[in-house]
Amino acid sequence: MNKSRRDGFGSKFGVFAAVVGSAVGLGNIWRFPYVTGENGGGAFLLIYFISVIIIGIPVVLSEFIIGRRGQGNSYGSFKRLSPKTYWYLVGLMGIFAAFIILAFYSTIAGWTLEYIYLSVKNIFSTTTAGISNPETVFNEFHTSTVMPVVWQLVSILLTAFIIIGGVQKGIEKYSKILMPLLFLILVILAIKAITLPGSIDGLKFLLYPDFSKINSNVVLDALGQAAFSLSIGMGVLITYGSYIKKDNNLLKTALAVSVTDMGIAVLAGIAIFPALFAFGLSPQEGAGLVFIVLPEIFQQMFGGQILSLLFFILLAIAAITSSISLLEVIVAYFSEEFKIKRYIATIIGATISAVLGVFATISFGAWKNVKLFGKTIFDNFDFLATNILLPLGSFFILIFLGWSFDVKQTKDEITNQGKLKSWFFPVFLFIIRFVAPLAIFLVFLKRLAII
Ligand code: PFF
C-alpha cells in the first residue's frame, strides 16, 4: 500500500476527540465508580492517579511513537520497526485483547441501549417509583437471553457502521460531535448531583483517602483501571498514532488526553457518589451500580426521566466511541496485513467479536453456571484483559521502546525531527526504561504473592 494514501486524522482537534473518544468510555462512567466503591473510595482514586502519571502517560506516548514511526496497525508497526524479531507478538497480543474487550464491552454497551429505551418508556421517574423496582428490572433484563443479545448486536452494528466510514470520515467525524456532547451531559449531571442535600458525604467518600484500605489487590485493580481507562497496552494508541500527522506534538496530545480521561472519571464520580449518598444507598453495588442504584435515584428526583435519558445516552456515546477504537485495531490489522477491503475486514472483525460477545452476554443468565477459575465468562474476559493483558502489553511496549528500539528515532518522534524542545526526553527515557516497567513488575509480583 502506498504510505501517503493511508487514511488518517485531518485536524488536531480530530486527533484529540478520537483518542479521548477511545479513552473515555464505560471504563470511566460504568467501571470507575463501582471499582472505586468496592475499593474504598479516595485511597483507590489516589493510586489510580499515581498509576496514570507514572505508567499511563508514558505508555500513551510510547504507543503514539511506535504507531507514528511504524505507520501501521499494532502488528505491522512492530514488524516494520523491528524486523526479524519477535516484537510483533506484542502487537498480536493486542489484537487478541481487542477481541476479548470488545466481546464483554459490547455486552454493557447493549445494556445502555436497553436503558435508553426504558428511559424513553418512562420507567425511571417519580411517577413510577414503587411501581417498577430498578433492581427487579435490571435482574430480569440482564439475565434474560434475547434482548441483551439483540442490543449487543445493535451496538456492534453501530460500531461497524462508523468504522466502515474510515478514519477521517468515520472515527474522527463522529468523535468530534459525540465527545463534546458527552462532556456537556456529564457536566449537567454533576451539577445536579452536587446541589442535592447531603451530597457532601459522597464527595468525601470519593476524595478522602483512607490508607487502611490499601492492599495489593487494590493496587492491581488501580493499575488495571488506569490501563483500561486510557486504552493502553493493546495497540489502540499504536493504531491511532499511525494516523497522526507528523507535525502533531505527541507529548502534548498524550498529556491532554490522559488528563481529560482522569478528569472525566472524577466528574463521573462527582455525578454519581453524591447522589448515592444523598439517597442513602451503598457504593458497593458492583457492575450493577449505574443500572440499579442510579435508576433508584432517578425515581426519587425531580426531572428523573429526562436525567435518566441523558445519563444513558451519555453512557451509550461513551461505549460506542470506545468500541470503534477496539474494532479499528482489528480492522486495521486485517485490512493491512491480509490486503482485504476495509468493509470486508469490518464484517469479519465484527462477526467474530459478536460471537464472542454473545458468550459474555449470556454468562449473566443462561450460562451463569459455566465457570472457569470460579468466574463467569464475562468476568474471565474482564479479568484477563484488564488485569493481565493490558498491564503485560504496557510492560512490553515500554521495554521495546526503552531498550530495544533506536533511541535517536524515538527522540525524533518526540521532538518532531528536532523542531520541538527536547528537555523532556531524558526524563521520558528514564521513566520508560526503569520507573514504569519496574512499577508494573512489582505490582504483578505482589499480586502473585511472591514479595
Ligand atoms: N478506555 C475505554 C474505557 O475506559 O471505557 C475502554 C477501552 C477501549 C479499553 C479501548 C481498551 C481499549 F483498547
Image (cartoon, helix red, strand yellow):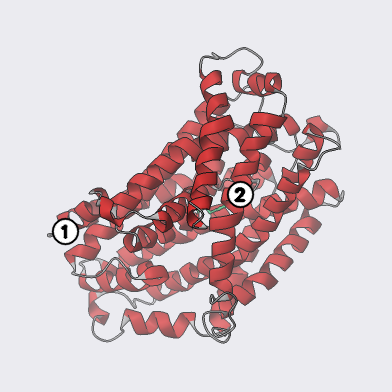
Query: Is residue 17 visible to us here?
Result: no
Residue at image mark 1: 196
Badge 2 residue CB within 8 Å of ligand 1: no
Compared with residue 148, is residue 387 higher up or lower down, i.e. above or below?
above
CB contact under 8 Å: marks 2 and 1: no
Q: Is any part of residue 138 visible from this angle?
A: yes
- Residue 216 appears at what percent x and percent y? 42, 55
Amino acid identity at mark 1: Leu
| Image location of residue 61, percent across then percent down | 57, 33
Query: In which quadrant of the rendered image does the N terminus lie?
Result: top right
Q: Mark 2 points at which residue?
A: 392
Q: Residue at point 39% right, 72% down?
A: 288
Q: Distance between the residues labelled 2 and 1?
A: 42 Å
Horizontal placement of 258 versus 60: left or right?
A: left
Lateral position of residue 382 relative to residue 352, left or right: left
Q: With 98 as the anchor, is 184 left or right in this view?
A: left
